[in-house]
C-alpha cells in the first residue's frame, strides 16, 4: 500500500468538525505507519473547524511527522485563522471545462437534458456541483430562485422562505437548504452580471446593463454569512429576499434567463 488516507469532516447533520476529532486524529498520527509508505489527511471542508479546532491543529501543521501530508480543502480560505494559513502552501484546484462536465452528465444519465443544461451554468467547473444541481431538491430550489429573480413584483419573501424550508427536518437541514438556495441566487446573479457586462461592453454606460445584479449578489453573499452567525434560516432567507425584491423593483425587473 502506497499511502493510507484519513478524512476528517463534520459528523452527519453537523456543520462543525469537533475539536475531539482533531485530537483523535493527532493521537492516530503519533502511531508509526506500518501499512503504507505515507499518510494523507484530508480535512473537508477545513473551514468547518472552529477556532479551537484550528488552534489545536497548529502543532500538527508545524510537525506533521514523516511522510505525512495534510490537505485542507476549502472554498473559503478567509475563514481559516491567519496562523493556519501561514503554515500551509496554497494550491488552487482548477475547474473542469464545461464540455467535460457535459460529457460526464450525459454519460451518467443524470437528470433530464433541460436540467443538465441548467446544471452546466451552476457548475462553475465542479462536476459534483453539476450533479447536485440535477437532483430533484436542487431543481426545485433553482425554480424558486428563477421565480424570485424574474418576477420581483409578485415576490412574497415570507412565503418563499417557507417554501424553501418546507419538509426540512431539524435546524441542520434547514440551514443546508437555505445555504443551497442562497448559493443558487449568488450564482444566478453572478451569471447575469457577467452577461450584462458583456452585452453592455459597447454602451456608453455599461454599468447600467449589469445592475441590479451586483446588489443581488452582495445580498446573497451577506445572507450566507448570516447563516454562519446562527441566525434562523427563515429569517435569513426572508431578509435577503426583501432586499432583492427592493433592488429588482427599483429598476423594474431586468431581463433574466430561464
Image (cartoon, rainbow, N blue to C red):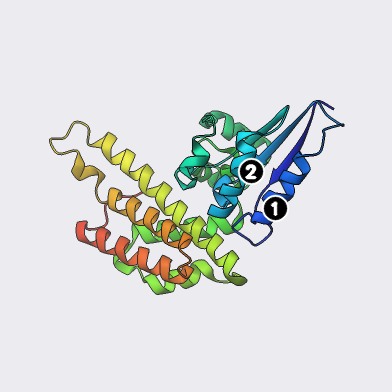
**Which label's residue is closer to the chain start, 2 or 1?**
1
Q: Is residue 123 left or right of residue 106?
A: left
* Image position, residue 17 (x, y; %): 63, 54
Identify the residue at horizontal 74%, vertical 50% (top origin). 24
Q: Secondary structure at mark 1?
A: helix
Identify the residue at horizontal 19%, vertical 31% (top origin). 202
What quarter of the picture does the N terminus occupy?
Answer: top right
Q: Is residue 193 left or right of residue 72?
A: left
What residue did someone put label 2 on? 43
As drawn, 209 above or below 152: above
Number of the front mark, 2 or 1: 1
Q: Are marks 2 and 1 in contact (CB under 8 Å)?
A: no
Q: Is residue 232 left or right of residue 154?
A: right
* Image position, residue 230 (x, y; %): 48, 66
Examine the rendering and report whether any part of residue 105 can be seen: no
Q: Residues within 10 Å of mark 1 (few under 14, many from 20)?
A: some
Q: Secondary structure at mark 2?
A: strand
What residue did someone put label 1 on? 21
Amino acid at each position: 500500500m502506497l499511502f493510507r488516507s484519513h478524512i476528517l469532516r463534520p459528523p452527519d447533520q453537523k456543520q462543525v468538525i469537533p475539536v475531539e476529532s482533531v485530537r483523535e486524529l493527532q493521537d492516530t498520527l503519533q502511531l508509526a505507519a506500518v501499512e503504507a509508505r505515507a499518510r494523507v489527511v484530508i480535512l473537508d471542508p477545513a473551514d468547518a473547524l472552529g477556532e479551537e479546532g484550528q488552534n489545536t491543529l497548529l502543532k500538527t501543521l508545524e510537525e506533521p511527522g514523516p511522510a505525512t501530508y495534510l490537505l485542507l480543502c476549502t472554498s473559503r480560505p478567509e475563514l481559516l485563522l491567519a496562523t493556519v494559513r501561514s503554515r500551509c502552501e496554497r494550491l488552487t484546484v482548477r475547474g473542469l471545462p464545461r464540455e467535460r462536465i457535459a460529457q460526464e452528465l450525459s454519460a451518467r444519465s443524470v437528470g433530464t437534458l433541460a436540467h443538465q443544461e441548467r446544471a452546466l451554468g451552476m457548475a462553475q467547473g465542479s462536476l459534483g456541483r453539476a450533479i447536485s444541481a440535477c437532483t430533484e431538491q436542487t431543481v426545485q430550489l433553482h425554480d424558486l430562485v428563477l421565480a424570485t429573480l424574474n418576477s420581483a413584483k409578485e415576490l412574497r419573501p415570507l412565503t418563499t422562505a417557507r417554501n424553501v424550508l418546507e419538509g426540512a427536518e431539524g435546524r441542520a437541514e434547514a440551514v443546508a437548504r437555505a445555504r443551497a438556495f442562497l448559493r443558487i441566487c449568488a450564482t444566478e446573479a453572478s451569471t447575469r452580471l457577467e452577461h450584462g457586462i458583456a452585452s453592455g461592453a459597447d454602451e456608453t454606460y455599461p454599468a447600467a446593463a449589469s445592475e441590479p445584479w451586483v446588489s443581488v449578489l452582495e445580498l446573497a453573499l451577506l445572507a450566507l454569512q448570516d447563516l454562519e452567525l446562527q441566525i434562523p434560516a427563515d429569517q435569513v432567507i426572508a431578509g435577503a429576499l426583501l432586499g432583492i425584491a427592493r433592488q429588482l423593483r427599483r429598476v423594474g425587473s431586468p431581463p433574466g434567463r430561464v
